[in-house]
Image (cartoon, rainbow, N blue to C red):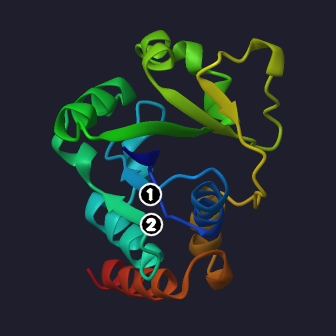
């Protein structure tokens, strides 16, 4: 059975930190593929801060070109909003019964997992891979057997840092893949001329 890691997020925009983690999971944790699930509306985030869905999906597609084990997914675009993970998992398992899905999330999200809708059911029914985030330590003694801590090399980069830098007119091209930087530059010119 194919093993697929579900890496959900706003990817507003996707950056090399996301890609580094996903690459590590494929090469060291034996995932056949990582699917980047672009989330249209995250219950934890303000919609006004999000770039358009189609742009964020396009940036993911541009980022992953050339690596066959990554896949950009707009699966959540067709689901009810806001996007709840348990809905997504249920729908994916129904659509792809021959795939074993595992959830990938940061320790910041894991530490508030008790506030997730149907969080206990997600833990009971799915494997979860938790990667470290600075300032969000995980109590290893309280980890259920279905949850795996990943000791991945991480870059302390955030999408909000990149957006702020762009707003300030800074050239942060090395925080994203070159095709993403080129597309972002085009997009910013487009919205300035509207």
Say above or below: 153 vs 133: below
Residue at the front extreme of this rendering? 1
- In the rendered structure, are the residues bearing label 1 and label 2 in contact, judged by CB atoms less than 8 Å apart? yes
Within 10 Å of disc 1 (Cα), the crowding (few <14, some 14-19, many 20+) is many
Residue 126 relative to residue 40: left or right: right
- What residue is pinned by disc 2? 69
Which quarter of the rendered picture does the N terminus lie within?
top left
Residue 192, x across and y down, in percent? 36, 81
Q: Is residue 81 visible?
A: no
Q: Quadrant of residue 6?
A: top left
From mark 1 to mark 2, how far is it between C-alphas?
4 Å
Q: Is residue 114 visible?
A: yes
Q: Quadrant of residue 132?
A: top right
Q: Secondary structure at mark 1?
A: strand
User: Measuring 19% from the left and 37% from the top, which residue is drawn there?
Assistant: 79
Residue 100, x across and y down, in percent? 38, 38
Residue 190, x across and y down, in percent? 31, 83
Say above or below: 165 vs 158: below
Residue 109 relative to residue 73: left or right: right
Q: Quadrant of residue 162?
A: bottom right
Residue 98, x across and y down, in percent? 26, 40
- What residue is pinned by disc 1? 33
Q: Secondary structure at mark 2?
A: loop
In the picture, the disc for residue 64 is none
N-terminal of the two: label 1 or label 2?
1
User: Measuring 61% from the left and 54% from the top, which residue is drawn there?
Assistant: 25
User: Measuring 48% from the left and 13% from the top, which residue is drawn there?
Assistant: 124
């Amino acid at each position: 059975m194919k093993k697929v890691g579900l890496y959900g997020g706003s990817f507003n925009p996707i950056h090399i930190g996301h890609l580094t983690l996903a690459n590590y999971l494929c090469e060291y944790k034996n995932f056949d593929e990582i699917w980047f699930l672009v989330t249209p509306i995250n219950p934890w985030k303000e919609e006004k801060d999000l770039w358009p869905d189609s742009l964020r999906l396009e940036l993911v597609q541009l980022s992953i070109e050339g690596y066959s084990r990554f896949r950009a997914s707009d699966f959540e675009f067709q689901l009810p909003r806001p996007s709840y993970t348990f809905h997504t998992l249920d729908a994916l398992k129904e659509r792809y019964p021959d795939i074993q899905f595992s959830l990938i999330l940061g320790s910041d999200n894991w530490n508030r997992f008790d506030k997730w809708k149907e969080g206990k059911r997600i833990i009971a029914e799915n494997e979860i891979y938790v990667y470290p985030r600075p300032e969000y330590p995980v109590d290893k003694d309280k980890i259920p057997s279905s949850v795996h801590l990943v000791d991945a090399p991480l870059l302390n980069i955030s999408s909000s840092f990149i957006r702020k830098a762009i707003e300030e007119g800074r050239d942060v091209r090395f925080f994203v893949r070159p095709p993403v930087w080129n597309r972002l530059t085009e997009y910013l010119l487009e919205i300035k001329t509207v």
